[in-house]
Image: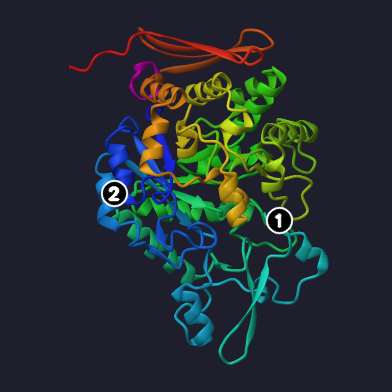
């Protein structure tokens, strides 16, 4: 795993207007980025779940461009794309064909029904045990033309129908998508929502041993096409530790809440502990299109967390105060959960638009081992788009602003984005990041993150109480 290079996370439509505009940014002012994760650009990119409900997962939405445009982006940097393994749109050709033809459809068996999981019927206890990220139960009734009704699993939205990932018809579908991604120049596949993909009666069916078994299967399938595997799972930190050896990359979703805890309390003990035990093959993030994850650092059942429930609640409270209360309105509380999984707000807003605090957090992100990734709104130090949230009613839209090119150019001229791009250049070009990493607690509030490679070094000194930092580094060698 490389420790150098920073990637961008962006929607093509919201950051560039399409594939050509995104490529112009990456080949121009953002040329320092070594990779880009282009969020779902399939047909349609603007569905009910912002592209995570594909009708045609193997085709670039023509309003954004085509596969040649994706290949053009991939010609100069790594490209990550999503493989949505848990579901497809109820408007997909495969699902419509199955509803129309039933057992005669070539896609029969591709979709998960209530009877598939509970062939002998399910009890109230078994049904309510299932973990779901949204309120309510994960089923939707669909009717075929002959009047037959089927109760289909819809873990996320009624229009997102779940795949039976154990069935050959679903395997054939996933292979068709993987072939299209590989042919389009994609180098890394993010397994979206894989933690929900396997339903096992008698359990909560989230990240069980059966799920890990499926991760092994789908990882092997992806690697057959020459692509790396990145797994997206919001769960107890031990789940990341368990899944990290099975794949190429996992997300470090515990880092953002631990940094918010440290910045809010001035303490570093929880952060230091995590830096000692976290997986090294991690994509480090502060914010994503889904918001700022918090649950990943908290307790689960009888397993203690890196943070306590009270400390998690305090993070949400500070975020609400910083956003005049609207982060509490925008953040969804899942079924059977006492608090939201993530904060729906921009990271800059949660830190009250304080440049020093924000750049300190970014510096820590860039100095910990792994592959740093910067969300497009975070890159531009974006504030909450409250108007978009009010217009759509989708809480995550506060962190999904649609930028014009003029807005992008103006933002990139600002102090914070310019300083952040300096960090991108440092992490991308300094040879120390190819060497050995160490972490040291200097005091109860100060930590030191250091990289050393021969005569080269890069050291971050951060005081979480004072919210200040400095970087000491040897000069970056000039390339002749």
| Residue 12 seen in this snapshot | yes
Q: Which mark is residue 18?
A: none
Q: Which of these two is toward me, 431 or 327? A: 327
Residue identifier under label 2: 20
Residue identifier under label 1: 131
Q: Determine whether, in the image, residue 106 is placed left or right of residue 275.
A: left
Residues rendered magenta in the picture: 427-432
| Residue 461 seen in this snapshot | no
Location of residue 404 with respect to 146 vertically, above or below: above
Mark 2 vs 1: CB contact within 8 A: no
Residue drawn at (72%, 43%), measured in percent from left and top? Answer: 328
Marks 2 and 1 sit apart, C-alpha to C-alpha, by 40 Å
Residue drawn at (54%, 67%), measured in percent from left and top? Answer: 163
Viewport quadrant of the N terminus: top left
Task: Determine if the magenta segment contains residue 431.
Answer: yes
Residue drawn at (38%, 58%), measured in percent from left and top? Answer: 178
- Residue ranking furthest to the bottom: 146
Where residue 468 appears, x then y in whole percent? 57, 13
Viewport quadrant of the C terminus: top left
Rendering quarter of residue 57: bottom left
Q: Determine whether, in the image, residue 451 is placed left or right of residue 211.
A: left
Mark 1 Cα within 10 Å, few/some/many (few <14, many 20+)?
many
Of the image marks 2 and 1, the number of the one nearer the N terminus: 2
Instruction: Between label 2 and label 1, give the one nearer the viewer.
Output: 2
Q: Which of these two is toward me, 149 or 218? A: 149
Q: Secondary structure at mark 2?
A: helix
Q: Secondary structure at mark 1?
A: loop
Residue drawn at (48%, 21%), measured in percent from left and top? Answer: 367
The overriding secondary structure of the stretch rendered in magenta is: helix
Location of residue 366 with respect to 56 vertically, above or below: above
């Amino acid at each position: 795993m490389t420790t150098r290079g920073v990637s961008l996370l962006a929607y093509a439509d919201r950051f560039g207007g399409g594939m050509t505009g995104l490529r112009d940014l990456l080949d121009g002012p953002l040329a320092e980025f070594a990779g880009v994760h282009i969020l779902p650009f399939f047909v349609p990119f603007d569905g009910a779940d912002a592209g995570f409900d594909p009708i045609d997962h193997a085709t670039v939405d023509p309003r954004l461009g085509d596969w040649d445009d994706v290949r053009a982006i991939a010609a100069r940097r790594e490209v990550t794309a999503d493989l949505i393994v848990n579901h497809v749109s109820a408007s997909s050709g495969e699902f419509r064909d199955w509803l129309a033809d039933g057992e005669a459809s070539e896609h029969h068996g591709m979709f998960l029904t209530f009877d598939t999981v509970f062939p002998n019927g399910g009890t109230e206890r078994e049904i309510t045990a299932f973990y779901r990220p949204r309120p309510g139960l994960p089923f939707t009734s669909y009717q075929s033309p002959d009047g037959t009704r089927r109760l289909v699993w819809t873990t996320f939205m009624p229009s997102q129908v779940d795949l039976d990932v154990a069935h050959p018809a679903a395997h054939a579908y996933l292979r068709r998508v993987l072939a299209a991604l590989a042919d389009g120049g994609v180098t890394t596949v993010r397994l979206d929502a894989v933690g929900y993909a396997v339903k096992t009666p008698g359990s909560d069916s989230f990240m069980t041993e059966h799920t890990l078994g499926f991760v092994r299967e789908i990882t092997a399938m992806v690697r057959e096409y020459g692509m790396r595997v990145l797994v997206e799972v919001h769960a107890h930190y031990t789940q990341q530790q368990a899944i990290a050896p099975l794949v190429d990359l996992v997300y470090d979703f515990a880092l953002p809440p631990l940094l918010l805890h440290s910045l809010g309390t001035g303490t570093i003990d929880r952060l230091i502990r995590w830096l000692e035990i976290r997986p090294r093959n991690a994509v480090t993030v502060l914010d994503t299109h889904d918001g700022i994850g918090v649950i990943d650092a908290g307790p689960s059942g009888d397993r203690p967390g890196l943070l306590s429930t009270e400390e998690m609640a305090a993070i949400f409270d500070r975020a609400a105060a910083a956003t005049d209360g609207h982060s509490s309105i925008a953040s969804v509380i899942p079924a059977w959960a006492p608090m939201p999984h993530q904060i729906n707000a921009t990271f800059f807003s949660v830190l009250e638009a304080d440049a020093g605090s924000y750049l300190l957090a970014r510096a820590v992100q860039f100095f910990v081992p792994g592959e740093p990734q910067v969300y497009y709104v975070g890159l531009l130090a974006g504030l909450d788009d409250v108007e978009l949230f009010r217009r759509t009613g989708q809480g995550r839209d506060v962190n999904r602003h649609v930028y014009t090119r003029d807005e992008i150019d103006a933002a990139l001229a600002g102090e914070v984005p310019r300083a952040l791009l300096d960090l991108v250049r440092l992490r991308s070009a300094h040879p120390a990041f190819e060497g050995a990493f160490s972490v040291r607690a200097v005091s109860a509030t100060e930590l030191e993150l250091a990289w050393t490679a021969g005569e080269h070094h890069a050291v971050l000194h951060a005081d979480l109480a004072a919210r200040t930092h400095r970087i000491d580094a040897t000069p970056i060698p000039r390339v002749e």
